[in-house]
Image: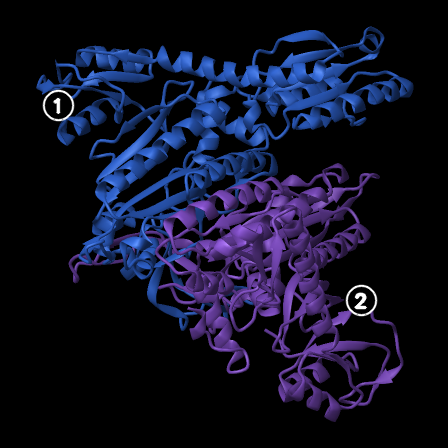
Chain colours: A blue, B purple
Amino acid sequence: MSKNLTTRSEDYSKWYNELVVKADLAENSGVRGCMVIKPYGYAIWEKMQAELDRMFKETGHQNAYFPLFVPKSMFEAEEKNAEGFAKECAIVTHYRLKNDPDKPGKLMVDPNAKLEEELIVRPTSEAIIWSTYKGWVQSYRDLPLLINQWANVVRWEMRTRLFLRTAEFLWQEGHTAHATKKEAIAESETMMHIYAEFAENFMAIPVVRGVKTETERFAGAEETYCIEALMQDGKALQAGTSHFLGQNFAKAFDVKFANSEGKQEYVWGTSWGVSTRLMGALVMTHSDDKGLVLPPNLAPIQVVIVPIHKTEEQLEQITNEVTVLVAQLKKLGIAVKYDHRTTQKPGFKFAEWELKGVPVRIAIGPKDLENGTFEIARRDTLTKELVSKEGIASYIQDLLAQIQKELFDKALNYRDSHITEVNSFEEFQTVLNDKGGFVSAHWDGTAATEAQIQELTKATIRCIPLDQAEEAGVCVFTGKPSNKRVLFAKAY
Amino acid sequence: MSKNLTTRSEDYSKWYNELVVKADLAENSGVRGCMVIKPYGYAIWEKMQAELDRMFKETGHQNAYFPLFVPKSMFEAEEKNAEGFAKECAIVTHYRLKNDPDKPGKLMVDPNAKLEEELIVRPTSEAIIWSTYKGWVQSYRDLPLLINQWANVVRWEMRTRLFLRTAEFLWQEGHTAHATKKEAIAESETMMHIYAEFAENFMAIPVVRGVKTETERFAGAEETYCIEALMQDGKALQAGTSHFLGQNFAKAFDVKFANSEGKQEYVWGTSWGVSTRLMGALVMTHSDDKGLVLPPNLAPIQVVIVPIHKTEEQLEQITNEVTVLVAQLKKLGIAVKYDHRTTQKPGFKFAEWELKGVPVRIAIGPKDLENGTFEIARRDTLTKELVSKEGIASYIQDLLAQIQKELFDKALNYRDSHITEVNSFEEFQTVLNDKGGFVSAHWDGTAATEAQIQELTKATIRCIPLDQAEEAGVCVFTGKPSNKRVLFAKAY
């Protein structure tokens, strides 16, 4: 079990790949670039979905569902968006198989079943959704449209990694339409803040809130807001984006409304999404060489109880004690599992639940029965303590809240100590290579400089942070004047 | 609004199509055969999902996610299944678009980006899932696998209708693997019963539980269990199926396990699913010429409150009264909406909420304020009554439960009065054409007879009911001996 896990210092990338598979989160499938999300991994994703869905609905959004396919002519209507996604599309060209006359028992594409127009498997749904919104919007009274969809999307990536980059992935995509520019910008910003709160409070992942440079912007957007997280290996990960689309899609799909004076205007749009990529961020923010470390909010099993016994009689006595505790914990809404398998030894169970990141493990043996205690082990700190059974349920409830908070504090501390201000390109390169993390540097604001820095260092501008004060300085690369630092990093 | 709805007696099919669109459930999209599920319709689907998901988990199932695509070679591995779905597949052949040199601003499929092996967009996931199970099962200790997936699937239907038959639809598909035949059969039966309970208790749709004939069986199954519902126009609708797969997929994908004696055996399988088709069944079981009628369990809004006022002051007084009631109803877990729009008159609002099927409408005007009453209207019976405000919240709670029950009873009464026993083919045809519904008849058990009856009458055998007692008789068509009646009907 976990003893076979490559350590992070040996090979971070290998550690990640192994951990995702061994902890039963996901695995590669027989389909190029597509993953299978296993039940344990999917249970974590369901917890993320439930919380995000609650936050979306609380802010007035409704769910809907739009088609998987986008006809080519619709896909190409918004030119920048089409160009941005054209190189990585799965394209449906036929609608029937037939028996292969040359190979008995085999099927072949029926050449007589060619589609008149090719269908693109959605890489994102702006085109299909804005073509629908055209029919939904006539007057300002129909606005805003605040709609979200939970869906699968496909982007034909050449190099894939479980959760981080897969040909098919699961996500939610919000698509809103507004009467004014101001309202659409406010919506984009609101959603960025919702993502940030979700990442920080629910996933215990600290994030920087910022906007993308033009180079890194979503194809078809006027502004892309983002949240950027830092992984343990010093590489950044874009954890969510929210786009102000201006009137680009409204113009491409002719979505107009009569304003309160009866004048026709184009609608203003936004779109925003997070995906199963967040699973990768979760793993690479908290986990360690023994396996997953899950924040209690996301753990499908928050507490596991393992009996330590030699005789059947001991097991029975332990089980009596545990039954009381399980009932108390469930009453507090805590997800608890009593692992009473007799096919496995306690040591095996300990390693298994460590690998799977269960936040709290409780062990109870004959000595504990005598003394009225339980042994409580924290997954995050790997520390143990003996706790009296009096008031233990509320003790555990508090402990889970404490673990949630401490995981965030630990990650925040790491992240904050890995934002380094540099003032020369030499320093830039040294910090990037020796320490990693975010490099905070002045930049002259041009795409040319951004591209050259990327070519030389593989670092990209992750974002222009929103809470960054203005500061006079000179671009680390060209020496031209700059009034604000931006964050560079190598990124997933 | 609803005054424009075609009546059921004028044209049932047109009534259905109009209602689905006008009540904001769904609409056709710009993609052939694919629908857009609108927020109001999707909210109903979410309620179905939540209840089914709860029932699945309560019976030990877990969710997971498998790829959208199935490589052709994997698809064709189980021959019967492949043959059954080959004629209606969406096939991905390319993975990139490029600029069309002949048409500026247009894109074309890049001929250099042809896939080595075509990918089928899943019409159902047995192939991809059993190819995965091969890696998950080694020993009897790994069994059973009890897994469900919520997903979109695509079947290239030529004639489509919103919810009832669409190229893409949403569904859940359970796929389980077992050590014994007995256990797999028990699982298939359990899931049929879960679907039946869901349909009856939650959707208020009575169903017949039965098994399909060989002709109607799922491609690749040894037995298909089903639940069959009857629509208001006398046509049947298959509302859910559960398949005992035998060892067919285990053999096709070489999924073996070591039994407790260490001997290698093939695994036994089941699969089961319900889809957004249930939305169509919902509409066609309960709704009327004024619009949707929703069972309270499925209504996104269970109670709507409409103020009747002439002056601002009256509205303020009404709103004070309503605020108290809304709080009381919410406390009881009732989904309530106060429709205080000033842009629309009460009559317009009444018609709108009737069209959308809100089970209970409450109106309150100046007279009610004086008398301490509310006017309560039931959507299903279109009856009204004045109710004193004392204890009104629990009155409404009881009323919702009563409506739920009465909708089921009404549908059951209709269904039961539309199961007609016939003993000759002449009678068969007369009943089928004049009355519709299920025709209960003896059949000689051959596919040939089944096919001939279908050709002559368009009726198919919907199921061999499970609760049907044996009874000596002769086939209505061939006169050959039969020991059990089966249910024929024209079907959606």
In the image, residue B442 lies at what x, y percent? 80, 82
In the image, residue A34 lies at what x, y percent? 47, 44
The residue under label 1 is A444
In the image, residue B174 lies at what x, y percent? 64, 51
Quadrant (top left/top right/bottom left/bottom right) for the N terminus of chain A: top right
For the residues marked 2 and 1, what is the alpha-carbon distance in whole angstroms?
Answer: 77 Å
Query: The numbered mark 2 sits on a residue in which chain?
Result: B
Q: Give the SS element for disc 1.
A: loop
Foreground pick, B354 / A85: B354
Q: Nearer the viewer, mark 2 or mark 1?
A: 2
Quadrant (top left/top right/bottom left/bottom right) for the C terminus of chain A: top left
Q: Give the SS element for disc 2.
A: loop
Determine if residue A384 is in view. yes
Query: The numbered mark 1 sits on a residue in which chain?
Result: A
Q: Residue furthest bottom?
A: B426
The residue under label 2 is B466
Foreground pick, A472 / B101: A472
- Find residue A13 and report its image quarter: top left
Residue type, numbered disc 2:
Leu
Horizontal side of B107 relative to B130 (left or right) equals: left
* Residue visible at 32% across and 56% down in the picture: A133
Above or below, A201 against B464 in this view is: above
